[in-house]
Amino acid sequence: MRTLIINGTFYTMAFEGDTVEAVVVEAGKIIFAGKKAEAKHYIKETDAILDLHGATAFPGFVDNHVHMVWLGEKLDRLDLSTIHSRQAVLEAIEQKVKTLQPGEWLIAEGFNDNQWDDTRIIDRLELDAISAEHPIVLTRVCRHALVANQLAITLAGITRETPTPMGGYIGKDGSGRLTGYFKDTAQELIKRSEPAKDVAYLKRMIGLSIDHLVSKGLVGGHTEDLSYFGPESYGKVTAAFKNYVKESRMPFKTHALVHHDVLTDYLSDPLKSQVSPYYTFGAMKIFVDGAFGGRTAWLNAPYSDDDATSGLYIHEEAALERLIKTARKHHLAIAAHTIGDRAIEKLVTLLKQYPSTSVLPDRLIHASLVSDKAIALMQDVPVVLDVQPLFVSSDFPWVIDRLGEERAQQLYRFNTLAQSGVPILGSSDGPIEDVSPLKGIAAFVNRRSIFDEKSYTKEESLTVYQAIESYTKKSAIATNTEATSGQIKTGFTADFTILAANPFLVNADDLANIVVEMTIIDGNIVYRNPALYK
């Protein structure tokens, strides 16, 4: 059966301002996009009609970098991200402990010391005072650091003598006492002792995540989950996704990055090519550095507020080079976490030295502090950038203290990069930031801090069209599907994000508040806003 979709403004995203009046969908594809009068020739009386009642339609939005299992966990756990006081965080933990079964772990998500009145990192002794009977782990909003109490540390077998792993940090005070603060690779020392997560648990997290993502107008996500869930992580996570696809009536287009730690499992998986359109594999994921919050992003020069460090490089240069050569041996593109200017320059130099033979482009994830040298290097390397516009909102103004005024001018250079021809792909890094693409679009355009409501380096703003393009047409570049997705066009997938207001007509200050009316995947309505459709 065919469906005629009418009475909306359909932005095709073929070029700025291009619209059609009606769309006809059949078997998950757009078979007509054009004038309403002509569309009726494709429809019989028995076919369906979807009336948008004046709403605005776009090609389906895609989050180009998200962690879907972690997002499900954040939705399921104690969420600290909205608590703006150090003391209030401790009080929330104390209240949560009272609800736990004996010996049950308390794992809380998203604390952000940069938004506290007292920015001191919580010490394990403070957590021990709350409970010595429950292992407690608080994950920082960036997921590059955590705080653990003594019981969690003991269960992990960590002592003062435990060596610090490459690319990590174990917090100690002046006497050598463990503070409970673990950064980057050192976090795994704690996480390896957390309760095991089986396929059923992972599938439930995926379900929570997808329900949330489609409610935000997203039809797909490029996710990175495969290596974080204990022994046999690759097998468990892939089974969870595939079981979800098989058992669920909710289509969602998941594109999975393959962390280098599970590359061997991926390569030996006889079923890796037997995937549906709802679960595909992509580039090999590498971490090059950390994040600004914990001063672990790898910089060319020391941090302005701590000249004793220039950050962390996760791999020695020779090891990083070996990883890239391994990916190339197997014709895989690279997707690299790069935040600091030194990390970006190093990575792009190696990508140029070892060109990709994959049909997929190499991806720089985050690309936060981008030097002129890095931009020049990118002109010779076919890369796309998976950026998080909401990082602008949550990093300014405190990041200026980290980097200094001069370097802060090179943060999140979206307009400069777009003008240089490098494709910008919008994403959230959820659960690190809110997964709403409307909030991302607003941040691209307004560059406004959530802390002081000021706009920073406004010259690096994108236009509304460019911002929407980063979640639609540009997104398709990363999966080599530009010929079939990302536009409202005959022959393309029937994926749509339906909005209650037109982003091109509202005030820029109202972009983040635009309501998602519907999300349509392969012609199927997978979300209707309950406030509008009762």
Image (tube, grey):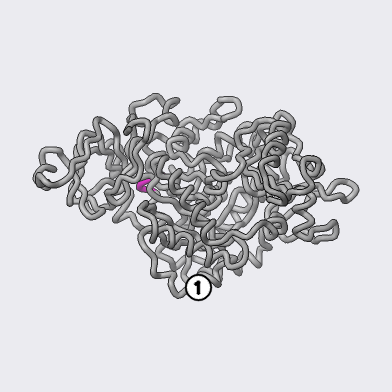
Image coordinates of residue 216 in percent, x first then y, are 42, 40
Image coordinates of residue 245 in percent, x first then y, are 40, 58
Give residue 186's quadrant in the image. bottom right
Image coordinates of residue 429 in percent, x first then y, are 53, 47
Say whether residue 458 is magenta. Answer: no
Which secondary structure dominates the residues rendered in magenta? loop
Image coordinates of residue 176 in percent, x first then y, are 88, 51
On-image quarter of the C terminus = top left
Picture residue at 47% right of the left edge, 57% below the top: 380
* Observer able to see residue 193: yes
Q: Residues within 10 Å of mark 1 (few under 14, many from 20)?
A: few
Picture residue at 40% right of the left edge, 70% below the top: 273
Q: From this viewpoint, which residue is outermost toward the right?
A: 175
- Towards the viewer: 407 or 115: 115
Q: Amino acid at mark 1?
A: Leu
* Observer able to see residue 378: no
Picture residue at 72% right of the left edge, 39% below the top: 304
Q: In the picture provided, is 285 more to the left or to the right than 165?
A: left
- Towards the viewer: 201 or 376: 201
The magenta stretch is 470-474
- Towards the viewer: 136 or 483: 136
Q: In the picture provided, is 155 more to the left or to the right than 318?
A: right
Say whether residue 473 is magenta. Answer: yes
What residue would you read off at disc 1? 267
Q: Secondary structure at mark 1?
A: helix
